[in-house]
Amino acid sequence: MQLRRSPQTVLVFTEFLRGPEEWKYGYDISRSTGLKSGTLYPILMRLADRSLLDTAWETTAAGRPPRHMYKLTADGLRYARTQVTAEDGQLLHAQPAFSGGKA
Amino acid sequence: MTRLRKLAVKISDTVVRRCPPAYKDWAQATARELEFIESDWAALRWALGSWKMAASCQNAPLASMSEVPRAARNFLRETRVSTVLTWFSLLGTSYWFSFFVAQITRQASLRLGWWLVIAAMAYIVCDVIVSPGRRFPRGGGLPEVAATYRSALVRQRDLLSGVWCWSRMAIIMPGCVMSAYRVWLMKPSAAREIMLKGYLVACGIMVLTLIVTRPMNRRIVARYQRTIDQLDALEGDGG
């Protein structure tokens, strides 16, 4: 369960805590957090390895390729809340930096 | 589809193809996102990021003995390429240097110093040739593959650290010092000034190279050692 608390990991946790019940896409997380894919995906992979993150392939209409989606598990949510401090938590109420105002 | 977009798709496809089976899903996940990225430049940056992610997958810890053949094959291939590049760069430098020595001076002690440098570089090439990188044992069992992988890791670790690494650097020094001292003793002239400046630049490049490569080598050596430890642990557990 132990995971290094890096600023990037906290950003990812913060993004997931914005909508804990929603499935999120990689590119949307990347835009909201400002993390590049080469940084974001290794974090997601580590979270999934530790069973903190659920992953699923989206079922889409015919002709469109499925997308990978992510959501924190119950353990992941608990862990994320311990990792995101009150100071980080202020970000939860701030506008996302890279999404042009959209979540 | 623009050229940039095509390039991004090509990179992503390559990443999916070359990613270890355990991480295939993740490579495909990054590839699928490309379709939802509007800007071509952003798509290219995304694809390059997925390449970085794939590189980190290649260095991922060994989870079981079944992953050893893939890791060994990749490592031996990378090692062979870097060894061949080292041979060519050293041989090329030696050839250029010997041509330079033959043309530029008739002073015996100066020529001796430079020939010593050339001999040292030739020795390093021979040293690497005498202990060549291992090849992947085709048709060999898992224990044989693991043993080959282990010995290749140990060889590369020792090549970048310890006595072997420092002795290779040290044998170049006598020739450099001897020729530099001889130039220092020469009567003041334009040629002497040029050669002294050349030595200063060469010293600067060597120091800079050491400053840049030392921490890099340390990280690489630590990674090799971690893999050796993982391999030992897996063999101890019986896979």
Image (spheres, grey):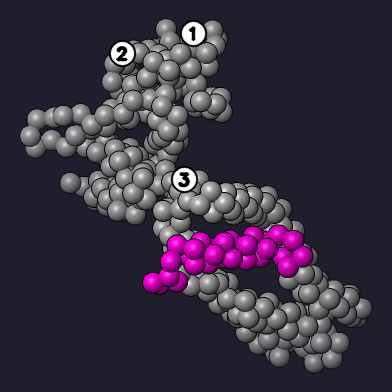
Q: Residue at x 29, y 38 (%)?
A: B29
The correct choice, above or below, for B89 with respect to B3 in the image is: below
Pointer 3 local density, CA inside 10 Å: few below 14, some 14–19, many at least 20: few
For label 2, the residue is: A21
Q: Chain of mark 1?
A: A
- Tell me where residue B19 appears, x and y as whole percent: 36, 50
The amino acid type found where label 2 is placed reads Glu
Pointer 2 local density, CA inside 10 Å: few below 14, some 14–19, many at least 20: few
Report if the CB atoms under discs 1 and 3 are less than 8 Å apart: no
State the CA–CA distance, disc 2 to disc 3: 31 Å
For label 1, the residue is: A90
In this view of the protein, which residue sits in the foreground, B235 or B19?
A: B235
* Residue B174 visible somewhere in the drawing: yes
Tell me the quarter of the picture where residue B101 sits.
bottom right
- Tell me where residue B88 appears, x and y as whole percent: 55, 77
The amino acid type found where label 3 is placed reads Ala
Same chain check for tags 1 and 3: no
From this viewpoint, which residue is outermost toward the front?
A: B238
Q: Secondary structure at mark 3?
A: loop
For label 3, the residue is: B63
In this view of the protein, which residue sits in the foreground, B41 or A66?
A: A66
Q: Secondary structure at mark 1?
A: helix
Q: Which residues are magenta?
A: B137-165
